[in-house]
Image (cartoon, rainbow, N blue to C red):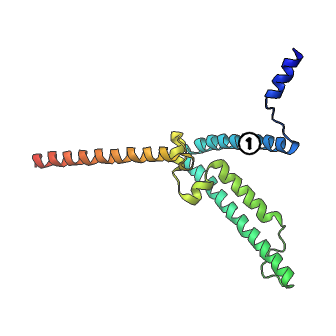
Amino acid sequence: MIRQLAEAAKRRVIPVFSFSEALKISTKNMLKRIVNYFDKLEDKVRHRLSRQPILYAFIGGTGVIIFWRGVWHLNDFVVAEILKKSSNVSAIGVDSLPWWDGASSVIAGGAMLLITGILVPSFIGNEVIISGIRKEKKIAEKTEEEVETELEKIKSVEKEMKTVIEKLSGIEEKIV
């Protein structure tokens, strides 16, 4: 019996992970869970805000402004630091602001845009409100096949509309 167990153990390949490999695996799993949580949160927020487009627009606009304000201030801070090191003159009046002012604005604005689902569409173009109402995926989340199927459906609807228009114009000619 013991001999059989020993032989079975020899035949099996038992993965042995070092501590760093185990840490990578657990970190990857943890990051996946965090991303999944925020993805679901974004979908819920987007769906709720899509029912109130004016509020959605104000929150999205505020997020965009805060984000770009942060980029601006962070850039001003970096330039001011470079100017301080190269000469004793500061051409930009950001000396009174703390170093984290720009970074915190970028983070706050980015978080607002991510949670409301506006970060990517605000830079690419969007139909966020419509897709939120229909509970559809955003174009960025759709696969190539889904986009192609949607385009085919749109083309078939266009063909049907053309035939309906032709029939209506034929009926109109008969009446007149």
Total numbered badges shown on the rendered structure: 1
Horizontal placement of 77 versus 2: left or right? left
Residue sitting nearer the eye, 27 or 88: 27
Residue sitting at the far top: 1
Residue 60 sits in which quadrant? bottom right
Q: Is residue 112 left or right of residue 154?
A: right
Where 91 falls versus 131 (above or below)? below
Pick the front one: 174 or 25: 25
Q: Is 85 positioned to the left or the right of 167 in the image?
A: right
39 shown above or below 103: above
Which corner quadrant holds the N terminus? top right
Residue 15: x percent and y percent?
Answer: 81, 35
The spot of residue 130 in percent (x, y) is 50, 46
Residue at 71%, 66% (x, y): give it: 71
In percent of width and height, residue 8 lies at: 81, 23
Foreground residue among 71 and 31: 31
SS at mark 1? helix
Residue bearing mark 1:
34
Q: What residue is rendered at 88% in x and 42% in y?
A: 19
Identity, as a three-letter code, of the amino acid under mark 1: Ile
Q: Residues within 10 Å of mark 1 (few under 14, many from 20)?
A: few
Residue at x-position 62% and y-position 42%: 43
Who's the residue at 68% across and 41% down the image? 36
Q: Position of residue 151 (x, y in %)?
A: 41, 48
